[in-house]
Amino acid sequence: MSAVKSKDTKMEIAFRKDLWKNGLRYRKNSAKYFGKPDIVFKKYRTVIFLDSCFWHGCKKHGTLPATRRDFWEKKISRNKERDEEVNLYYKKIYWKVFRLWEHDIEKNLDKIMAKITDFLNNKKNETEIKLQIDSRKCAKRHVIAIIEKNGKCYVGSDWCHNPQKVCPRLPGEDYSKCKTICKQDGHAELDAIKNAKGDTKAV
């Protein structure tokens, strides 16, 4: 199975080249983001996953090897479960997720690129309008709490109740400054714990 690539495939390279050609700049395969998206547009809170028909179990084109069939069925099934977990994670933190099938990219790349470009342009306009309306808004605008239980991440979120001109919470810092400086009431953490349905440890 070494011939089946899972990274930097012909599809991925062609897609990235088209993004670049359309003037879109991005991060690729960043381990800093949950699920390691193929493409990240941090400014617009958007991630893109390019799902190969083999690795993600496409109903139209996904085929399993004849040997070790039980192993591959479990492997692909877990990949599909993981995709759903990743989708839910980004939904809860208000990020946009594009999931694109390999066969769609090969056949409809122009239409897909137009859809993504239109979406990002609209996000750009929304961001500029918000800044004009209220430039004092906290950089984060809402509080996110992430907790880990049994190897899975659970997310809670809540709008900032006392937004600062500059968010005092640095990337990677825990929730303590939200409590002490911004007087946030902890709903984000409680929401995350509720999602995990049990005791957790902070990430």
Image (spheres, rainbow, N blue to C red):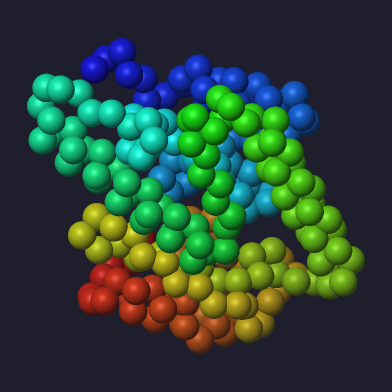
Task: Where is residue 121? Give x, y as percent.
Answer: 79, 48
Q: Is residue 104 left or right of residue 132?
A: left
Q: Is residue 108 left or right of residue 53?
A: right
Residue 140 in which image quadrant: bottom right
Task: For the C terminus, give its image quadrant.
Answer: bottom left
Q: Closest to the observer: 5 or 159?
A: 5
Task: Where is residue 42? Give x, y as percent.
Answer: 63, 47
Q: Is residue 105 left or right of residue 175?
A: right
- Specify whether residue 143 is in view: yes
Give the answer, above or below, for where 109 lies relative to 164.
above
The single residue placed furthest to the front in the displayed view is 60
Q: Closest to the observer: 122 or 134?
A: 122
The single residue placed furthest to the right in the displayed view is 132
Q: Closest to the observer: 120 or 41?
A: 120
Task: Where is residue 177? Give x, y as percent.
Answer: 53, 73
Q: Closest to the observer: 107 or 191?
A: 107
Task: For the N terminus, give its image quadrant.
Answer: top left
Residue at horizontal 81 percent and vertical 66 percent from the top: 130
Residue at horizontal 57 percent and vertical 57 percent from the top: 95
- Specify whether residue 176 is in view: no
Residue at horizontal 39 percent and vertical 35 percent from the top: 60
Task: Where is residue 82? Give x, y as percent.
Answer: 32, 49
Give the answer, above or below, for where 198 lies relative to 96.
below
